Image: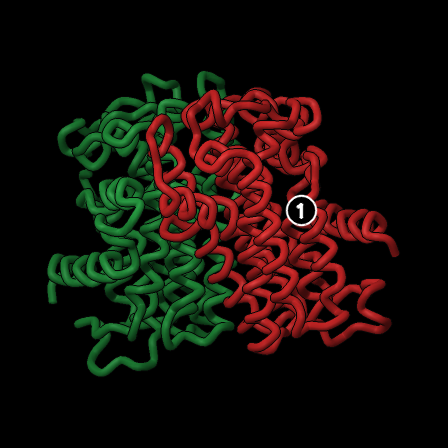
Chain colours: A green, B red
Amino acid sequence: MTLEEYLASRRGLVDAALEQVVPSERTYPETIHRAMRHSLFAGGKRIRPILSIAASEAVGVDIAGPQVTGPLVAGAERSACALELVHTYSLIHDDLPALDNDDYRRGRPTCHKVFGDAMAILAGDALLTLAFRVLAELPDVPSERRVRMIVELASAAGSVDGMIGGQVADIEAEGKKIDTTYLDYIHRSKTGALLRASVHIGAIHGGANPEQFAALSEYGFHIGLAFQIVDDILDVVGSTESLGKTAGKDAAQQKATFPALYGLEPSRAKADEHLTKAVEALLPLGDNAARLREIAERIVNRSA
Amino acid sequence: MTLEEYLASRRGLVDAALEQVVPSERTYPETIHRAMRHSLFAGGKRIRPILSIAASEAVGVDIAGPQVTGPLVAGAERSACALELVHTYSLIHDDLPALDNDDYRRGRPTCHKVFGDAMAILAGDALLTLAFRVLAELPDVPSERRVRMIVELASAAGSVDGMIGGQVADIEAEGKKIDTTYLDYIHRSKTGALLRASVHIGAIHGGANPEQFAALSEYGFHIGLAFQIVDDILDVVGSTESLGKTAGKDAAQQKATFPALYGLEPSRAKADEHLTKAVEALLPLGDNAARLREIAERIVNRSA
């Protein structure tokens, strides 16, 4: 299977699982479920759930063939769903007029533009709530593992070193001159924590032993940072069309970004450095981590 | 111990536990933690966590003295915290200009009036996220029980028959003529579900057997409805001062309420009917449920 085929296959599994766990548009009250689905099924790349599945596959025990062709750990796409639910909730809330005030996301009007601010706030709330329910109800996964996954998700999404904390720091940095420590906190928390948690949750689902977990955690840390640096770079060099969201917003809003602080070329070098470290971290996992290595390379070399 | 003493003692335990689980105002990023605490420590009555503790006590096995004096089931105040975190998140989001647009709550300016809309949205998100983390990390509670509590909380807070669903139905009913089925859905979901989940979570924490759980669930169902009917009545007859929030808002916003549909006296009769059923449901639990009976009476006969 090529990487493209692998990504498409895992994306298909994730979409099918999301379809199952999210109430249908005919479920009462219909409006909220339409709003949740509007943002959830908007052509996202499903990077977080795919990372999670790939991490399960890198350590999973119930694998039939050679890892590189990627037979799936049972149910890994279900726990992976929780990550997409949380990611989508964060996009909906971040796009609100009170926050980033974005009209377009993934190439279509944002949730609040279609359903209004009230419904967008509630749709985000509902996706976040559902994410925890999905993990708590995972079939055929021991309660111990489910509880560990929930702790991972809640802390990655939380206010201390998680997504909300990073978002607050980002808001407070607007228009201010910030230093590298501050930018590092924003990157680690705002995007890095959930990407790392994606790897952690997959590792827990797959039953990683402590050594495997540590290797994957290190990998997750570095791809999390690489991802955000590349995101910042693309906001500078990309077009609104290829990104599916408004380009150049960071600079316009005087956001704290890597290119703003270091310049474009040093930012690219930094992303490559994290890629190297991410790939090195995978060494103890041998061939089973081949997909994770390919995904890391794709994250750093992507153009949207 | 009188009921007053009991409520004060349990409230004290809940507040102390909340103090432990919520990051301090000195935890970075400080603003978000100040915003969370602003709304959380605003003199709430802690009805949900107290109900949860009382349910634990009604079934708990590790109780030293006679149940009526209320020795505590170990750690019950910790799981009870999660309910107050979710309740407070819902108040913060409901008070936003995009939703109910309330300036005062519990007698002080609402979160967004003090910290702005962006921070209020994020503070609500953070409280919701933290609630699940608190349950997932409950010390000395088997993972099986923690997972069950998380499912209870997520479904009571969710978009189908939970708080968010009720809120959506409530918004969509504004200014419309609605029927009793519709109003019933709003009441059951918007307030009833979380009150019932409070009882469920306490029951799970205390290790209720299926018969005890069923009795408590029936009790929780009826006090949930009674609570909301009385809430609607108080909005009509109460003053802003005694309520600590703006009185008369329901009528002004043409909200769907019990008194609007049935009139005041029939509403009072309906609340009493639910009280009777709640108390009857407790019979299988005997004397151990004395506090729950008293609390139900207090909920129906309260004036604020």
- Using residue A167 as the reference point, say whether residue B50 is left or right of it: right
Q: Depth check: give the residue in front, B154 or A12.
A: B154
Choose top left, top right, bottom left or bottom right for residue B30.
top right
Report in which chain the residue with disc 1 lies: B
Q: Depth check: give the residue in front, A124 or B210.
A: B210
- Using residue B299 as the reference point, say whether residue A32 is left or right of it: left
Q: Which residue is mark 1?
A: B299
Rendered location of residue A92, percent (x, y): 33, 36
- Using residue A43 as the reference point, say whether residue B185 is left or right of it: right
Label 1 environment density (alpha carbons within 10 Å; few <14, some 14–19, many ≥20): many
Q: Depth check: give the residue in front, B101 or B283.
A: B283
Q: Residue at x 53, y 51 (%)?
A: B194
Q: Residue at x 48, y 57 (%)?
A: A152
Q: Residue at x 72, y 45 (%)?
A: B19
Question: Could you tell me which quadrant the N terminus of chain B lies in?
Answer: bottom right
Choose top left, top right, bottom left or bottom right for residue B34.
top right
Rendered location of residue A83, percent (x, y): 36, 53
**Of the residues shown, which amino acid type is indicated by label 1?**
Ile
Rendered location of residue B10, percent (x, y): 77, 52
Q: Is residue A7 visible?
A: yes
The secondary element bearing badge 1 is classed as helix
- Using residue B239 as the reference point, say whether residue A11 is left or right of it: left
Choose top left, top right, bottom left or bottom right for residue A34.
top left
Q: Is residue A236 visible?
A: no
Q: Is residue A153 above or below residue B171?
A: below
Question: Could you tell me which quadrant the C terminus of chain B lies in?
Answer: top right
Q: Is residue B107 above or below residue B9?
A: above
